[in-house]
Image (spheres, rainbow, N blue to C red):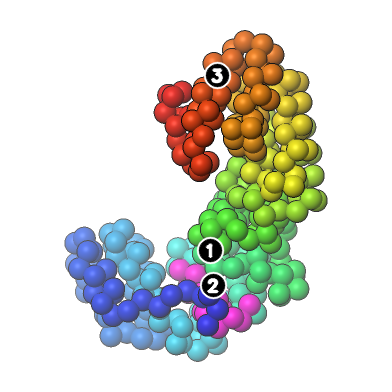
Amino acid sequence: MSPLSMKRMGRAALLVALSSLTPVTARAEATLRPAQCTVQGMLDDVRVAMKNGSPALKRYVKMRLKEAALAMPAESLLAALHGERDPEVLEALGAALATKASNAENPGLIQPLLARATGDADPALRAAAVRGLRGVPSVEFMEKNGGVVTYEQLVRDASPEVRAAVADNIVSESADVYSGHDRRVSEAAVSVATASEDPAVAAKLLREVSMEAVGHEAVEQVTRQLRAENPELRAAAATALGGVPGGASAGARGSLVDLFREDKDPAVRKAALQGIARLGQAHAVPVLESLRGVDRAMDAEIDAWVSVLKLNLQEWELVLREKQRRRR
């Protein structure tokens, strides 16, 4: 089993989940039958829980479907996927199928889900199909499937819900599947941000996906976003440049210094300062001090960064937390 495969939930964990459920309606209690093991029976339970159940029950039935899907015939899951018209149920079914694909190391299993994501006339169903891929190595799977459907394609969808689902998936995959260490996912985030015509989606990807493993071309793509028309996107690009690998830090630092000097938007300038601070930490102090007076309104921000960096804290998260505490 691949290290990326989903971990199976044991019987004891299921009992704990059941014991934590809040009261559900009489209808939900009457309809849910723990002995049901067929795909359709479990989907009926999901359907009732989505309509009538508590948040805890909803989590449980989706988790139970994922667990059961590992042993269910793929053909039964795919048949159910083809005909499902309820977005919440489709998302749960898609997540179960994607989990099975990850567990079996069979990327082809998600292709019908991707077909729903691109071809369904209902944007709510397209978005649900995309969300079904969350939490699995979907970028790798799309690549192994020959790039027939990619996030670069999906992020151009006319529906804001679909575009938001794409960003959420990639952010989650980077953080939860790979802990920010996978170059392929990080570079996919940059490519999708570049392909996106939605500045908010592009900004989310650059702001929230780790850039620690990206290569030169991705750094160049991020740097070009410093000239984007949208200030939120420029600020996100500045934040992203602060996290690039050490070999790219000198060029990134120069770009951020230029951005601070030239850009008039306060949020962009703040992001540039943060990027400079992160790239050099204690060694960034002289660079930051050289920027005093460029914008008097930013001098207090510079002073805060300098004072924190002089503490020589070893972890960036500690630096950031202390900086936020001082500038509340």
Task: Mark 2 or mark 1: name the one nearer the start of the chain.
Answer: 2
Whether residues under marks 2 and 1 lie with C-beta atoms below 8 angstroms apart, the answer is yes
Determine the CA span between mark 2 and mark 3: 43 Å
Q: Is residue 166 above or below residue 312?
A: below
Q: Does the magenta stretch include residue 93?
A: yes
Q: Earlier in the sequence, mark 3 or mark 1?
A: 1
In this rendered view, identify the residue nearer to me: 186 or 132. Answer: 186
Which element is circle 3 on? Answer: helix
Residue 67 appears in which quarter of the rendering? bottom left
Residue that appears at 23% across and 64% down: 21
Place of residue 24 in the rendered image (x, y in percent of width and height, measured from the top left): 22, 63
Between the residue at mark 3 and the residue at mark 1, the CA separation in whole angstroms equals 37 Å
> Which region of the structure is painted magenta?
92-107
Task: Where is residue 78? Give x, y as percent.
Answer: 55, 81
Residue annotated with mark 2: 4
**In the drawing, what numbered circle is on residue 222?**
none
Residue placed at 67% from the left, 35% from the top? 238
